[in-house]
Image: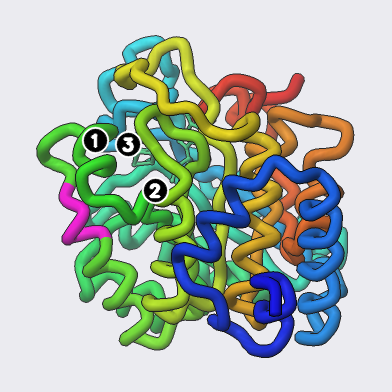
Amino acid sequence: MTALDKALVAPKNLNEDELAKMLASTDEGLWREIFAAAREVKAKCGKTEVLPRGLIECSNVCAKNCLYCGIRKGNDKTVRYRMPEEDVLGCINEVRRRGYPAVAFQAGEIEGEANTAYYERHIAMCRGLEVTLSLGEQTEEVYRRWKDAGAMRYLIRIETSNRELYAKIHPAECSFERRLGCIRMLKRLGYVTGSGVMIGLPGQTIDDLAHDIVFYGDENLDMVGMGPYVAHPDSLMPDSRYQLPTTNYQLSLRMIALTRLYLWNVNIVAATALEALDPENGRRRGIDAGANVIMPNLTPEKFRVEYDLYPGKVKT
Ligand code: 5AD
Ligand code: SF4
């Protein structure tokens, strides 16, 4: 039986080695089969329908300095904003007008009472909508308060499941252990929990990416959101590069397909960064590769231009 046949028998029926071998393949014919198999599994799990979640980037204020990120604290070219409540309400109304069932609040990572209360108020404005949060590392108390306010999902990317690579792309004060602890805490608190990685980071290998997929399974994630790494001109990243078999864009589509084949019944987001690299087709190709969630960006333009995580993200 080939690895691909095995993958179609049951979830988690591939090991890390098999995932790495598939990921390293340059056989276009094999990749066509893998993408078709990912769609087959998606249909088998009843996930053919594309689920929209209206994305609101509430603030680009961030206390962290992740080396790769355009809105990291130390980038003084970024003009900081926090959306006034009436603008947030306008976005929520747009979600309702479009008939989307769900809204997602995303922002730079900050902690503190004012921040906690700001999102409690937003969540309270969302009656009848499902609320996803993407607000980074917080204390258990804060996650609990947002859950009590009505939030049901939380997305927090681990960025890479390789601890050494994590340490290379973050300043010393960022802790892999704390981030992983947050993912586990969110699960324990009953959030529908999602995580994911960046694909094609300098220093990242195929084995790292195969391990990321196994990590998603080991942590029992309900959702996966991952996308290509895109170098930002104001980043502090080391520029050492390993030879990956294809572009970050192609590799991201392949990661989506293999994640679908490995986990089967999860929600996978067709990441915005796919669109940054392929504005015409990125989203659709993510769906064709096995994703089933899209997050159309509803942030008003005047704020959106400052939510500049990576080049190509902000479309004008
Ligand atoms: N390229 C791709 N994704 C990035 N992110 C931040 N910077 C970049 C970049 N240069 C992603 C991270 C983070 C999310 C907010 O944006 O995965 O979790
Ligand atoms: Fe802040 Fe997130 Fe960017 Fe890190 S990746 S600097 S936490 S917005």
Residue at image position (73%, 81%) is 8
> Where residue 214 sits in the image (x, y, percent)?
44, 69
Marking on residue 260: none
| Residue 176 is a magenta residue | yes
Quick check: is the Cβ at mark 2 less than 8 Å away from ligand 1?
Answer: yes
> Where residue 92 sits in the image (x, y, percent)?
68, 58
Q: Which residue is mark 3?
A: 62
Residue at image position (44%, 81%) is 220
Residue at image position (55%, 51%) is 226
The CA distance from mark 3 to mark 2 is 17 Å
Q: Which residue is mark 2?
A: 159
* Residue 56 seen in the figure: yes
The CA distance from mark 2 to mark 1 is 10 Å
Q: Which residue is mark 1?
A: 170
Residue at image position (28%, 53%) is 114
Q: In this view of the protein, which residue sits in the foreground, 303 or 104? A: 104
Disc nearest the viewer among 1 and 3? 1
Under mark 1, the amino acid is His
Residue 88 to residue 201: above or below: below
Question: What secondary structure is found at the residue carrying circle 3?
Answer: loop
Under mark 2, the amino acid is Glu
Is label 2 in contact with label 1 (beta carbons under 8 Å)?
yes
**Residue 97 location, quadrant:** bottom right
Quick check: is the Cβ at mark 3 less than 8 Å away from ligand 2?
Answer: yes
- Magenta segment range? 175-179
| Residue 180 is a magenta residue | no
Under mark 3, the amino acid is Cys
Question: What secondary structure is found at the residue carrying circle 2?
Answer: loop
